[in-house]
Amino acid sequence: MMDVFETKILIIDDDDEVRYSLSRVLQRRNFEIIEASSGEEGIEVASKEFPDIIFLDNRMGGMSGLETLQHLTGISDRFLVIMMTAYGTTQTAIEAMKFGAFDYIIKPFDTEKVQNLVDGALQAKADRESVGDYEPLLNSDDYKEGIVGSSDAMQDVFKQIGQIAASEVTVLINGESGTGKELIAKAIYQHSLRSGGPYIAVNCAAIPENLIESELFGHEKGSFTGASQMRKGKFELCDGGTIFLDEIGDMELATQTKVLRVLQESEIQRVGGNETLKVNVRLIAATNKDLENMVERKDFREDLYYRLNVARISLPKLKERSSDIAELIDFMLQRLKKQGKSKVNRTSSEVLSLLQNYPWPGNVRELENIIHRASAISQGDTILLKDLPQEIKNWASENKQHVADINSETLFEKEEKYQSDTSPDFTEFGPETLDVSQLESCFEKLYGKLRETGQEKILALIEKAMVKKALEETQANQVKASAILGITRATLKKRVEQYKDEG
Ligand SMILES: Nc1ncnc2c1ncn2[C@@H]1O[C@H](COP(=O)(O)OP(=O)(O)OP(=O)(O)O)[C@@H](O)[C@H]1O
Ligand SMILES: [Mg+2]
C-alpha cells in the first residue's frame, strides 16, 4: 500500500487547542497529521502508524512527556521527537535530549519556528537514511581494560576469544543475565580482522515483533503502512562488518528462517522487495535462554541452532567465580573515581567478605549496581556495611553460616565500634583542607591511648603503620611507596629489613 502523503506527523498533547493550532500550521505543507490526546494513546498510535515526526507535550495528565519519550525511543530509534514545553527550563531540555528527543520547542509557538524545526527534522531523517546508523564502538582502550577476571573460568573465556576472534566463525555466547555477554561480543569484534568495519548490535527482545524484519533486513518504500521511504536494514548496513544479535532466543520462528538464509546464502531481501542482495556479515549471537531445550520444544529452529553454535562461549555465573569479585569491585571503584563520580577507594573487609559470599542472582550487573549505589551513599573513602542495600544485609544475617571470617551476630556492631572509637576519622575533610591542627585533633585519642599504656617510641610505631599502609597500597612497590611516604628508597628498605627482624 502506498501512502498518499510523504510525511506523517503525530501530535501528542492533552490540550485540544494546541493540537488544533499546530495541525493547522502543519497542514499547509500537505503533511499527514495524526493526533493523540495522551502519552498512552500516542505510543499506541506511533507503533501502528510509524510517523516520521512526533510533537510531544512535556506536561500531560497520565503518562508524562519524558516517560512517553522513553517508550517511543524504545520502539524505534528512528522517531524524530520534538518536545514541547510551556516553560523553557534547561532541566527539561537536557532531560529531553538525554532521552533521545530530536529537539524541543517552547510554547506558545511561532509558525516559522515550527516550520524550521520540521525542515530540520526531515533533513536529519534523510541524512540518517543515506549514511546508515551503525553504533560507533567504544574506542579500543575502553574495552581493553573493561573486562576483568583472573579466575580460571574467565581466563578460559579470554583464551577462547583469542582463538576464535580472528576466524570468521559464527559465535554463540550464552550465560545468565548480567554475566557480560555484550561485553564479550564487543571484545570478539575488537580482536577480529573486521575490527575496522561496522559493528551493529540488535536487541531482538526489545524490538516489537512486527518491526524486527524491517529492522534487520530493511524495507522497500510503501511495503507497509508507515514505510514512506526505502530503508536499509541492519544486515545491509553492516556489510563487511559484525552484527551482534542479542537475546536471539527471543526471536520469532519466521525471523529465524530469514536469519538462517543469511548464514547459508549470504543474501537478504528487504521486506516488500524482490531484489536479492549479497551481504558479507559475521554473526555473533547471545542468549540467556537454554537453546537446546528450545530446540527440543520446537521453539527454536534446529538448523539455525547448529549454524550459530559453531563456536560457543559459555559465561560462568558470578557465584562460580567469586575469586573475581575483589578485582571487579576494585575495577568498578577505580572507574567511578576516574569519572569523578565518587571518592571511594575500597570496601571494608567485612563488606568484601560478605560480597564474596553473596550468591549474585543478577551476576556482574547486580554487583555493579550495588557498588554504584554504595559509593554514592558512602560518606568516606570506604564502603561500609551500612552503605549496602537492605536485601544484602538481610541475606547476611539470614545466612550467618555462609559468611566466612566474620561473626555476623556482631557484624554490624563491630563495624560501628571500629568507626566510632578506635580509628581516627579523616573522612569529613578531603586532602585539600587537611592542616596540622586537624591532624593533631585526629591523633589526640591515639596519642592519649599510647601514653596511657606506657608505650615507648611512639613515632616509630606510627611510622611502621604508615610504611605498612603504603606498601599495601602500592602492592609492595618500593619506588612508589617511598615517594608516597616522602622518604628515600634506601630508608624504606632499611625500615623493611628492620621490621622483618622485629618480626
Ligand atoms: N568481566 C567483567 N568485567 C567488568 N565488567 C563486567 C564484566 N562482566 C560484566 N561486566 C559489566 O556488567 C554489566 C552487565 O554486562 P553485560 O551487559 O555485558 O551482560 P549481559 O550478559 O549482556 O546481561 P543481560 O543478559 O542482562 O543483557 C555491564 O555493565 C558490564 O560492563
Ligand atoms: Mg545483554
Image (cartoon, rainbow, N blue to C red):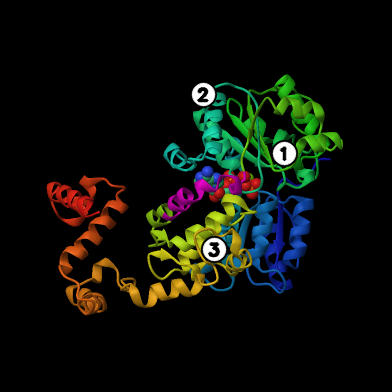
Q: Magenta segment range?
A: 317-333
C-alpha span from label 1 to label 3: 32 Å
Which residue bears the numbered disc 1?
248
Q: In the shown orientation, is residue 355 left or right of residue 78? A: left
Q: Is residue 502 above or below residue 227?
A: below
Specify the quadrant that holds the N terminus: top right
* Element class at badge 2: loop
Disc on the earlier residue, 1 or 2: 2
User: Residue 215, position in %: x, y?
Assistant: 70, 39
For ligand 2, give the image quadrant.
top right
Residues at discs 1 and 2 in contact (Cβ within 8 Å):
no
Which residue bears the numbered disc 2?
193
User: Residue 24, position in %: x, y?
Assistant: 70, 63
At label 3, the amino acid type is Glu
- Viewer-nearest residue: 385 or 126: 385
Mark 1 vs mark 3: in front:
1
Residue displayed at 17% across by 69% down: 458
Which residue bears the numbered disc 3?
95
